[in-house]
Amino acid sequence: MRLNWFVKVASRLLKDSQGESGLGTKGGEEGMEARRKWFGVKKLKETFAFIQQLDKNMSNLRTWLARIESELSKPVVYDVCDDHEIQKRLAEQQDLQRDIEQHSAGVESVFNICDVLLHDSDACANETECDSIQQTTRSLDRRWRNICAMSMERRMKIEETWRLWQKFLDDYSRFEDWLKSAERTAACPNSSGVLYTNAKEELKRFEAFQRQIHERLTQLELINKQYRRLARENRTDTASKLKQMVHEGNQRWDNLQKRVTAILRRLRYFTNQREEFEGTRESILVWLTEMDLQLTNVEHFSESDAEDKMRQLNGFQQEITLNTNKIDQLIVFGEQLIQKSEPLDAVLIEDELEELHRYCQEVFGRVSRFHRRLTSHAPSLEDDKEASENETDIEDPREIQTDSWRKRREMEEPPSSQSLCHLVPPALGHERSGCETPVSVDSIPLEWDHTGDVGGSSSHEDDEEGPFYSALS
């Protein structure tokens, strides 16, 4: 565009300057024509000066426009994540803004020159030259507006980055405060060397604590979401402080969750063992109670004959046979719990085993005495009286415990540990039949020695009991 102007103007000036020398010698119409041409040449010189100024201004603007557009296109780089860094970047942006404002006058002069040229018939002798000037004006206007907009957006983005940083730092600070408190709670659980009742309370407390940890996961996910946005929009710091904070928060939450899970697993194992023991013991007590009631009904209230009663008694025998192994396993399990439990819990378990042992001997003793009476062909009046007295005697020393079982328990446990053997009174010094029964059901030589199944004695010292045990064997 500029070359066309220069050629056109130069040719016109060259042509018109040739007649400029005769202006003073000619008069009339020729003089008027000469003066008109002279003014035309003067105007062309002015137009040429405008064009030169426009070319100079545009040359300077092109270099500056390219540089400022490049600066504004670069992402803002933050070295660290703090307020000082934000102020530093805002100061740099303010320098760019001042540079833009300083060049606003030069841009405005270009717009004015272009506007003058658009209204100059010599500069815009045809439509092509007018379009060229208009295109130059529109291009400059577009780039200038874009630079102003980019500068404003850059400043607003820096300010927004600081607001996002503040939101992230505040959320992380609150999460970290809770995390520190939670880590202190998980560091000292009451899960070792604790009573069963305290373990149950601790289990409930840590179950609620675990739910709280899972609820805090939502807050941690929000922090991660905020960081992903900062990273996606190039708002993170080159020192990777934000990245380290997020990574540390994720790792600490994961470690906390794993530790609480391990604590709960340990507490549940401890309480489940005790609950399993208590549940099995309760079921055996219920079974013994039902058998006791059924035996009372058969023995005292049933109108059935002896054969039918014997058949029912055999049913009791089968039930006892089926449950002896369960009782023996419960006793072994209880002894293991005693060794692992605290002293107060150990005493309680011993009392429960003693209660179960007494009840087993009471019920099984009644079954054996009733069986003896049924198998006796000619029961005498004294036998009936003796049987009645035996029913009231719950703890017959001959049916409770053998010396061999007591000695074995004393050898298995240290002197300081409490044992079940002291819960049962020692056997009297009667003459024994030589058939002693250990506590283990598996070692019972007889088919149905139920007093021996629960740790009692199967001594047959009375002649009246001989037929009963021979019938059982």
Image: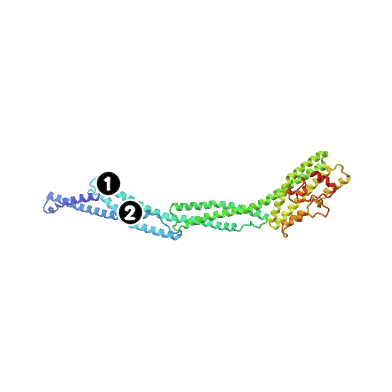
| Front-lying residue, 457 or 190 | 457
Judged from this view, the residue extending furthest toward the bottom is: 84
The reply, left or right, for residue 273 in relation to residue 110 is right
Mark sitting earlier along the chain (1/2) = 2
Say which amino acid is labelled 1.
Answer: Asp
For residue 282, which numbered disc appears in the image?
A: none
Q: Please, what secondary structure does the residue beneath circle 1 have?
A: helix
At x 22% / y 53%, what residue is drawn?
48
Mark 1 or mark 2: which is in front?
A: 2
| Front-lying residue, 441 or 240 | 441
**Would residue 331 be seen by someone viewing this image from the given angle?**
yes
Expressed as whole percent of the image width and height from the top left, the position of residue 314 reads: 78, 41
The reply, left or right, for residue 347 in relation to residue 67 is right
Say which amino acid is labelled 2.
Answer: Ala
**Would residue 209 be seen by someone viewing this image from the given angle?**
no
Judged from this view, the residue extending furthest toward the left is: 25
Expressed as whole percent of the image width and height from the top left, the position of residue 153 reads: 40, 53
Neighbour class for label 1 at 10 Å: few (<14), some, many (≥20)?
some
Expressed as whole percent of the image width and height from the top left, the position of residue 374 reads: 83, 42
> Label 2: which residue?
66
At x 71% / y 52%, what residue is drawn?
334
Expressed as whole percent of the image width and height from the top left, the position of residue 191 reads: 63, 56
> Label 1: which residue?
131
**Quarter of image, res 92:** bottom left
Judged from this view, the residue extending furthest toward the right is: 381
